[in-house]
Amino acid sequence: MDSDLIVQILFAAVKTGTPLLFIALGEVICEKSGVLNLGQEGMMLMGAVVGFLAAYGTGSAGLGVLAAMLMGCVMSLIFAVLVLHLGANQVATGLALTIFGTGLSAFIGSGVVGQTIQGFQPIAIPLLSDIPFIGKILFSHDILVYSSFAMTFALMFVVNKTRIGLTLKAVGENPHAANAIGIKVLRVRYLAVMFGGVMAGISGAYMSLVYTPMWVENMTAGRGWIALALVVFASWRVGRIMLGAYLFGLASIMHLVLQGLGWSISPNLLAMLPYVATVVVMVIISADKFKEKLLAPRALGKPFDPRQMA
Amino acid sequence: MKKHNLVSRLELVNITKQYPGCLANDNISITLMPGEIHALLGENGAGKSTLVKTIYGVVAPDKGDIIWDGKEVNIKSPSIARDLGIGMVFQHFSLFETLTVSQNIELCLSKTQLNKIGDLAARITQLSEEYGLNVNPSRYVHSLSIGERQRVEIMRCLVQSVKLLILDEPTSVLTPQEVSGLFGVLRTLSEEGCSILFISHKLHEVTEICHKATILRGGKVVDTCVPNEETPASIAKMMVGDLAEQDAGYAKKEGTERAFNVENLSLPAKQPFGTSLKNINFELKSGEILGIAGVAGNGQDELMAIISGEDERNVKNSLSLDSLDIGHLHAGERRKLGMAYVPEERLGRGAVPDMSLTENTLLTHSDGFVKNGLVEWQSIKEYTSALIAKYKVKCHGEFSEAKSLSGGNLQKFIMGREIGQNPKVLICAHPTWGVDVGAALAIHQALLELRDQGAAILLISEDIDELFLLADRMAAVCDGHLSPVVRTEATNIDQIGQWMAGTFINNSSLHTQEAKA
Amino acid sequence: MIRIQARTEPSSLMKVASPLLAITLTLIFGCILFSAIGKSPSQALHVLLIAPLADSYNIGEMFVKMGPLLLCAVGLSLCYRANMWNIGAEGQLLAGALGGSAMALYFIDSESAFALPITLLAGVASGMIWAAIPTFLKLRFNSNLILTTIMFNYIALYLLIWAVHGPLRDPQGFGFPESAMFADSTLLPTLFESSRIHLGVAFSIVSAFIAWFILSKSHLGFQIRVFGSDEPAARYAGFSSKKLSWFVMLFAGALAGLAGVSETTGPIGQLVPNVSPGYGYSAIIVAYLGRLHPLGAILAAVFMAVLYMGGDLAQIEMGIPVAVVSMFQGVLLFFLLACDFFINNRLAFSNQATN
């Protein structure tokens, strides 16, 4: 493999990893507050279709992203009301959200299948993009990729250095204790779930406005689920999510690598690779039960009803 | 109480709180003066916890007024309570184990409070020295002992310069020595004018430290008194009401031959903040009760889990029943050999909340009622109603869901169910925790009867008085170590208290050092 | 004013009424949706719900769709009762279709009476293998069952697509990604002359009764219920979590595998890429709608099959995208979960104002 090809592959890995990065950042915040939202795939699909429709209608990709964020937020609110207010099972509600989002996105997007739009154009950052290797790989992307960098660093700061991060961790570890010292547990969880929805929306928009750019039914192809695995992979740490997202991005474009090596394997078998990689990674990461219990938010997936104070 | 102020610190007027199916507080009125240490006494379910949560703004009362420093206030949330100067130390601590002491305290403070304090860590260190609390701000809470955690909670209140400190059963998690340390801090605070509301059911503590006491029963104030003018017995009478039958002293027995043995049992902790067991050795004889004292979280849960087989790790050579190694068997096989258990958590472990008593009988009685893999529901139903009758379990019959029973009645049911298997060895944890006096008496008598029939009983409890009452031999656990085992007549509360604090650990390591030298 | 109040005992009426209420609310939602996109709600409801049951052919087709839904849902009901979050029925179904088809193609020139039973067993075994891998990974390596089963759905799908493009493709099929048509000896017999209702539908109903028997009469079923309702109690009682996990997962895998092989050897008669229109995912909703009760699943599967039929008809007759079915399924589950809130809570009407 020559160095040009390596740069191309790594560039593509960042691009492919970006939707995973967005959605996993949203999910990690949600999980840190103790809520497991399995509806990522549904929210992402809705973000993708609404983002595409808005951009198609208005001609503005920016408005498309805004619409997708709003849609993701609305979807997450359905989940939040059911889980946080009505005490519904988080796993079942998340599944319902994914099934609903899959159907609704196909339904409202059926008219624009195959249409194309003008998505975001790459903007090479002056100076930085001239750095050999790194410049091409990291600084010749579109605006959404750059905002994913900014979002990662902002979240690292907020989670690790601020009182907001402290509150989030407290709610995810012991909601009853948090309630007893006066933290509004449900409010924190609502905000965390909604943040997850907004990020899933952006992630979907990235798929339909930048990555392809078009709308096809089920175009996210399980990325919402892979993002959930990514959070486990990253041990609920924001910084590691970025690394994980790009590694998964790399796994998804393995066919490029293999072509570079001159191997020929059926594309249908190669298409399995990201899913197989996910399973392998999860097995390796979770095998240490002790460590996972230590790192996972302790109240993850458990309902909290402020009326039931023992 | 040094100065005589005219304005009360806190006055509760006719506080009423109704929960579905239970009137938790019924027209309760209490007055607290500055610097007063006031005991709130009552059995479990008397309404003490609900009342203090009302004062702290966690529970909203249905009726009644709260007057603070002469002004009527509406305490809608804990943060309002804290702004007024009310601090609370919870029975089950409201600390976050994955955060540091200083982060835990920070979470309770408002921005203005934080700004006023400036360097929080320095302030904690300073207060720690002032009151002898020995709290290090940079340590993670999960690395602290229970006693240290309580001091962090008290620190959390001190940082906010409280005028009223509420402590919910603060001594139930402490060794006797730690209790006197706590009382020292409370007396200092009282002298500085801080009022203290002290919930307890340990009467000798109340007579020792409290200026006044209010006694609750069934959600109502039934009496008030000045504790040092009363005896524990006279206060007990006020708490229980019509003089319920009390435990008398029971005769101690010597066990016969060895039934169960634990040898060189060492195990690393399985849970992240658990306790590892360190070289535990003891034997349990038929026809005796061996009591294990200790503050919660010193390895009792881990010991019970490995003995019962719920902890599935193989400790083949460390556990034996009738000289047969059982450490490699799984929990079901150990039950078949004659082991039975009464766990601490009665609802959710000892019984399935959403299942009927009949189904809960089947939970540990698979042998007699399953033929060819099918359940004989009719005979298990009959057995269950006999069990309910024999142990006087109050319920709506054998189809009642376990969660509909009161703690005491459910405990009688579980106790009866386990005894009904004629166990060779019964492991019993905190059997009367949260149980009313009548049920506790019935449970004690059932245990003694089982002992007299020749069963070996291991009794794990945090209640030292109960252990002295029932146990024939005693030991204590501390940080996963087991103290020497002694006959109950040959020891006293002071020695067991020292052991609970771990003094035996230093001694034994000293001995080995000496031996080496 | 109206307040929400916790019930002291869960309402057994609401446990039954909640699915019916959820279906009603979903239909109301559907009417509003159809009005919004300018279709007549009454016509849409007629097409979705009445037309699928209007004649014997449609009823037969409805049963053909019910079979795989019920087979998968019965297995999932048992899994969810034991708190094993198996989302992998779709993959297990596809694996069953793939494994069964490979065997059917092996018997393509055979007239043996054993050809069909062996083919079905191959499908069942493939489904079990596909369930066994995530189960093993969970029990041995503590990996998250939800995520691994989902991943195995995708892996099964691409494996199946690869197979119909490669080793199992019909050599005389002009390059279409399909297998050859199976021999008669490996096709499931139909039960009635005039419809496509096949033996697989009967299997599904029998499986529901077997699961019901296990759950309510056997000690194994009791252990499953304890394990799902209260895991610490199950460990305390000494029930083996490994044994129970293996049982429910293999049972579910076997039924889903049977569903897959029954589709290819039944109504389809060959292996095609789109064996399943998401039956394995819909079965999750069927299981919930049936209250995780195997007999309840029969009713729920009938309803879901009607909805599937209705979706097909709505596309043909009214031009409504077939995706509407999946959307309705999601809405249905939302409403069901919301209605379940009232099993443990009720609305209290009082004149007393509270602060």
Image (spheres, coloured by chain):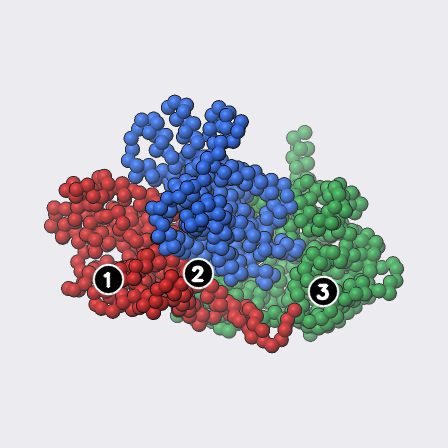
Which chain is mark 2 on? C
Is the residue under label 3 in contact with that under label 2 (CB below 8 Å)? no
Q: Colour of chain B?
A: green
Q: Which amino acid type corresponds to the residue marked 2 in the rendered image?
A: Phe
Disc number for residue B74? 3
Disc number for residue C334? 2
Residue B77: where, in percent of width, then height? Answer: 67, 60
Q: Colour of chain A?
A: blue
Q: Which residue is mark 1?
A: C61
User: CA–CA distance between discs 1 and 2?
Assistant: 28 Å
In the image, taking residue C75 as reference, residue B77 lies left or right, namely right
Front residue (pair B199, B436) = B199
Q: Note the chain letter of the red one.
A: C
Q: Give the residue at the far top of this rendering.
A: A2
Q: How many marks?
A: 3
Number of residues whose C-alpha sits closer than 10 Å to that of mark 1, classed few (under 14), some (14–19) or many (20 or more):
some
Which chain is mark 3 on? B
Q: Residue at x 42, y 33 (%)?
A: A12
Residue A211: where, in percent of width, then height? Answer: 41, 40
Is the residue under label 2 in contact with that under label 1 (CB below 8 Å)? no
In the image, taking residue C305 as reference, residue A15 lies left or right, namely right
Callout 1: helix, strand or loop?
helix
User: CA–CA distance between discs 3 and 1?
Assistant: 66 Å
